[in-house]
Amino acid sequence: MGAVESTEGEREPLLAPSQPEAREQPGSSREQPGSSRVFGRRWVVLALFSTLGFLQGMVWNTWGPIQNSAKHAFGFTSKDVAVLVIWGPVGYIPWLLFVWLMDKKGLRTSLLLAALLMVLGSTLRSVPIPDLQLRRWLIHGGQLLNGLAGPTLMSAGPLLSTTWFAPDERATATAVASLFGYLGAACSFLIGPLAVPAPNDTQVVNTVTHWDPGQIRTHIQNVLYTELGVITVFFAFALLYFPSRPPRPPSVAAASQRLGYRSSICRLLSNVRFLMMALAYSVPTGVVAGWSGVLDMVLTPASVSQVDAGWIGFWSIVGGCVFGVAMARFADSVRGILKVILVLMLAGASLAATWFTLTCLTRLTHLLSTKATLYTSCILVGIFVNSSIPIFFELFMETVYPVPEGITCGVVTFLSNLFTGLLLFFLTFLSTELSWLNWCVAGSCLFSLLLVILFRESYDRLYLDVFVSV
């Protein structure tokens, strides 16, 4: 799979076998030292990790769904809103540092650092100073700190699933850990428009508007305080209890030796099959993430209100999360068909994105453009693209094994955020007419579909668990 070989003792086993119990409890089952075993606490670990990912996604997508309100409350422009969204991808610039920390220090240290950055970022953007110019800088700084938590929370899902879960639960655990961040972004589509007044929905009587920038600012401040409080509580939970690994490994693959940090990077960069799939994953997910972050701006020319745009974004991501977990559970039950699942998902995404793009160009295409067609096509894009993420992750792990999961996902999520950042960077200059953004979504899905069709799949990790364990 690559040009660089790993030495015998380059890396300790991912999970070292535990010592046999000093005394055997009466009535307990006898287990061999170092044997595989799953622990019930794995669900607590998964829930805590997923909740922090949920909150990080919610904070990242705070401003897009309420961009009209933020413009009136803080004097933001469309460019400011795009920059606030772009801080998430910018947080991936030092991704090599976070991946190294995850590889060397384990899940606990990496998660605590990510949660601390979220607390600091939420605190910074919640400081209620009257100087709006300085307040805008604090908000930007807070969004950047929250973005720095992204490399860990978006990359560590497959590492957590391998470390804690049995082979027939791995894809499901990966789906939950990886998709909860997107679910948090979806909830911000719902919470923001419902909690913050939208100026574009107000009535005008005798040329006097019935909204007040100070009142809108107060509502936004309440949302920021609430998010800060919840993040602080779950940071305390993680500080009190979040073990890096269980006492015993859940599978043969979890206990096996892995490549070292440098060898892993070289192995990935020299693996053509991995690079092909990395592009197939990162291009559509990165483009759709940036597109979702400014969905209100995309739908405004189609006479869709801020609240309706929020509901469309909410259901597109929620649908993708639910469908993604369901497909991951199916992949756990029927192993060895990850490529087939991806082809079907990306074909559906390509069709839905093309339908949405042509519907938005109704003056040229004369297609029926109603709220129902916009809802349906946009939601289908989110369902198919977001649900493909855990399937991509599992296929990556099978393809590049024995490269550690955290390093592999760190590379591909960095590429995804790179494409998100590039898209939003161009958006700061091309924000007046956004049909090009819709075409980017459709083109990225079709590009990914072609790469997946050409990809030759393999299941190296699954082979080890099935045959070596027997």
Image (cartoon, rainbow, N blue to C red):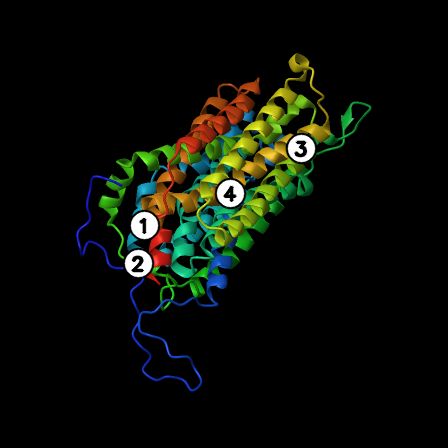
The answer to whether marks 1 and 2 mark residues whose Cβ atoms lie closer than 8 Å is: yes
Circle 3 residue: 376
Q: Nearer the viewer, mark 1 or mark 4?
A: 1
Quadrant in which the N terminus is drawn:
top left
Left or right: where 361 falls relative to 282 = right
Query: Looking at the image, which is closer to me, 363 or 84?
Result: 363
Circle 1 residue: 404
Q: Position of residue 99 (x, y in %)?
A: 33, 46
Looking at the rendering, which quadrant does residue 97 occupy? Answer: top left
Vertical placement of 440 versus 187: above or below?
A: above
Q: Amino acid at mark 1?
A: Pro
Q: Amino acid at mark 3?
A: Thr
Q: Amino acid at mark 2?
A: Leu
Q: As drawn, which residue projects farthest toward the top?
A: 364
Query: Looking at the image, which is closer to me, 56 or 346?
Result: 346
- Tell me the CA gap for discs 4 and 3: 35 Å
- Tell me the CA gap for discs 2 and 4: 38 Å
Vertical placement of 301 versus 69: above or below?
A: above
Q: Position of residue 233 (x, y in %)?
A: 52, 59
Q: Dot 2 lies on which element?
A: loop
Circle 4 residue: 125
Counting residues from the N terminus, which is met first, the one under dot 1 or under dot 2?
2
Q: Dot 4 lies on which element?
A: helix
Circle 2 residue: 14
Q: Position of residue 68 (x, y in %)?
A: 63, 30
Residue 116 appears anywhere in the view = yes
